[in-house]
Amino acid sequence: MNELAPLIADLALILICAGVMTLVFKKLKQPLVLGYIVAGFIASPHFSLTPSVMDAASIHVWSDIGVIFLLFALGLEFSFKKIVKVGGPAIIAALTIIFGMIFLGFMVGSAFGWSKMDALFLGGMISMSSTTIIYKAFEDLGLAKKKFASLVMSILILEDILAVVLMVVLSTVSVSANFEGGELVRSILKLVFFLVLWLLVGIYLIPLFLRKTRKLMNDETLLVVSLGLCFMMVVIAAKTGFSSAFGAFIMGSILAETLEAEHIERLVKPVKDLFGAIFFVSVGMMVDPAMIAQYWLPILIITLTIIIGQATFATAGVLLSGQPLKTALQCGFSLTQIGEFAFIIASLGVALGVTSNFLYPIVVAVSVITIFLTPYMIRLAEPAYNTVYKILPEKAKTFLDNYAQAAEPRSGKDSPWKQYLSPVVRAVLLYGILCVAVCIIGFGAVQPLVSRWLPDIWARIATAVVIIGSMAPFLRSMVIKMNKSEESRSLWEASKSNRAPLVASVVIRLIIAMGFVFYVLARLFHISVLLILLLAFALVALMLFNSWIKRSSHRIEQTFMTNLRSREMRAEYLGETKPAYATRLIDKDLHLADFDIPAEIPWAGSELHTLNFGQEYGVHVVSILRGNKRINIPKASDRIFPHDRIQVIGTDADLEKFGAALQSPDDKLPEDLSAGEMVLRKLSIEKDSPFLGKTLKDSGIRNRYHCLVAGIEKEDGALHVPNATLPLEEGDILWLVGEHKDMEALMAL
């Protein structure tokens, strides 16, 4: 009999322990994460009553894969557009919490006499609250729909993305083994560069690839392709000096912008759950009771630091963002725990070999305590508010109320200059990053390749053509962005003082474009500076006026924007969200509203021109949604059917009147239900029957008496399908279906 591989035996032990513990913790209504940690402790050498894992190194490799899947799944749930939607309060609060807790954790670690790396990683671990634990606590306590709960979830969205950034920064600081500001700035700039580059390229290429191969994709192939893309980005991130988890998160974020995002998320979830369980079990394996007993005082102090620090910084951050005191305290008391990201950051420190052995078990113990206390801390928020409000001076109450009122968002448009400059600056940064990437690839890969096959001068010329040709669409878009826009024209016509800054913005972008071309030419050709400047100017001018480059830049930008907005466009097409123009109607006292057509509406099936909603109610139908079909700007001959959803434009009063009309149909049951009862009867064709010799078509049984001939029984007993063109014969038996009253009238003949 073959000997069982240690890894398989270890997996069997881990999964059995995890399965039993999940059932136990499910029964106890406790977070499953705690169950996995307990399962890991049971499977570890620290628990002598059960068999122990033999090949811990292999389990750690699997747990690393678990981290990759966890971050990949987090990226699939995340969209960088959410950062814009979460709003200022969440951004202010998240930044306050993270910087405050990192500083506090570093000070606590330093006070214990730990190394700088231990103290720094401790600050990172205690700065991130647990999205999973908080979400479950809100669901269990029935608070998920509260205003403060939505703000807490927005803060957690920001914390998740900042946690990934923090992991990259910690990795860089650990490798460089110093805290120099210049090194940190370079690391952040490198992070931003690659982050933007990967997102731009990924959002452009990957949706195109998925769209072209959609007919070939079933569940199996889509899962394999998605995981292949994930691990491809993991390798790329590792090769460029970032963590594997960062690469997984980036690919998840790219796929989150595709139409297949929900499908991929559903397919990946079982794999993520399996490897995520192995990761959390491996966390539990690090729990050493002897070490916890030895470091009970740091565990107690760090636990109090998290509870008091998170409550204080979160409350302060939410107050600073302009929220009321009660909302701020509810948010602060909800965030007083650490969870999955604390374990991920701790495992990062272990993998890099920069943290001490005692730090991991301490963080696990602290996490278990804070997770257990989470529901009680959330319930404690309101009594804490009542106490604070009683002892707070009146001046402080007045100040907080006035501050909250002043911070309320005001409706209004951005200034014309902001509307003009925001797209311009964005274009310069994004297209500039793409041009830098083209230069890096051109000089790093293209030039060495062509140099093998061509003579020196021709290799230089070919390299210049490839690099400048690849940059041309980006440089053109950078220079012409917003030059002919409505904002530019309005600023030009509004005041003569605006014209010089407008011209300057174009000239500056023109110089930047020439700078890229100048750099390429100067690096490849050793000729006079003046000649290179003239060539750079001529090439940029060619880019601006060449029709092929113009079409290419428009096509690239259009494809990218289509890919970026694909999910929003699908949701808008299906009527799940309102179109973008709906918000602009508010300025004109008009609104776009959705109405579902009831099945019992009397005019269902009528053409629009006969309904005349404009004259009758003052509203206009702009779209009809019928299943997965959308009819925009319907014609007068188009019909509205039951269960259609229509999008209607009108004023508040007109929409209210139209909505009331849709609710007016009487959907009550008739008092006499027997009137509509369907019955089955048989009618014999006798000598004196008025139907003898007539065809079914001419008999009037269906049109006059509203009855249906279901079958004709002949004298031989056989039942025949009715034929409307054959005459009825004596002895035929008609099997009829109809309403009771109609059947009685027919039988009376």
Image (cartoon, helix red, strand yellow):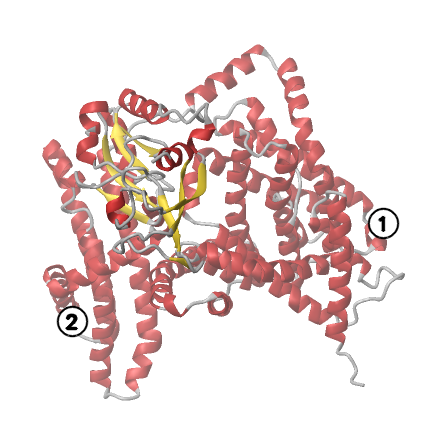
**Could you tell me how many numbered marks the image carries?**
2
Write down the residue under mark 1.
293
- Residue 588's place in the image compared with 152, above or below, is above
Which structural element holds mark 2?
Answer: loop
Q: Is residue 335 visible?
A: no
What is the quadrant of residue 587 in the picture?
top left
Q: Nearer the viewer, residue 478 or 504?
A: 478
Query: Left of 61 or right of it: where is 433?
Result: left
Query: Left of 627 or right of it: where is 322?
Result: right
- Picture coordinates of residue 96, whole percent (x, y): 54, 37
> Within 10 Å of the Cα at label 2, are there few (<14), some (14-19), or many (20+) other Cα atoms?
few
- Residue 616's place in the image compared with 725, above or below, is above
What is the quadrant of residue 311 in the picture?
top right
Alpha carbon separation for disc pair 2 and 1: 74 Å
- Picture coordinates of residue 78, whole percent (x, y): 48, 50
Q: Is residue 498 visible?
A: yes
- Picture coordinates of residue 405, whole percent (x, y): 44, 19
- Residue 10's place in the image compared with 370, above or below, is below
Query: Left of 451 or right of it: where is 337?
Result: right
User: Which residue in the rendered view is the most extreme toward the right?
Assistant: 49
Q: Residue at x 68, y 29 (%)?
A: 379
Q: Residue at x 33, y 59 (%)?
A: 433
Q: Residue at x 13, y 59 (%)?
A: 544
Q: Where's the N terminus, which quadrant?
A: bottom right
Identify which amino acid the numbered label 2 is placed on. Answer: Ser
User: Which residue in the rendered view is the most extreme toward the top?
Assistant: 394
> Within 10 Å of the Cα at label 1, are there few (<14), some (14-19), or many (20+) other Cα atoms?
few
Write down the residue under mark 2.
528
Q: Nearer the viewer, residue 211 or 150?
A: 211
Q: Nearer the viewer, residue 289 or 463?
A: 289
Q: Where's the C terminus, which quadrant?
A: top left
Dot label at residue 34: none
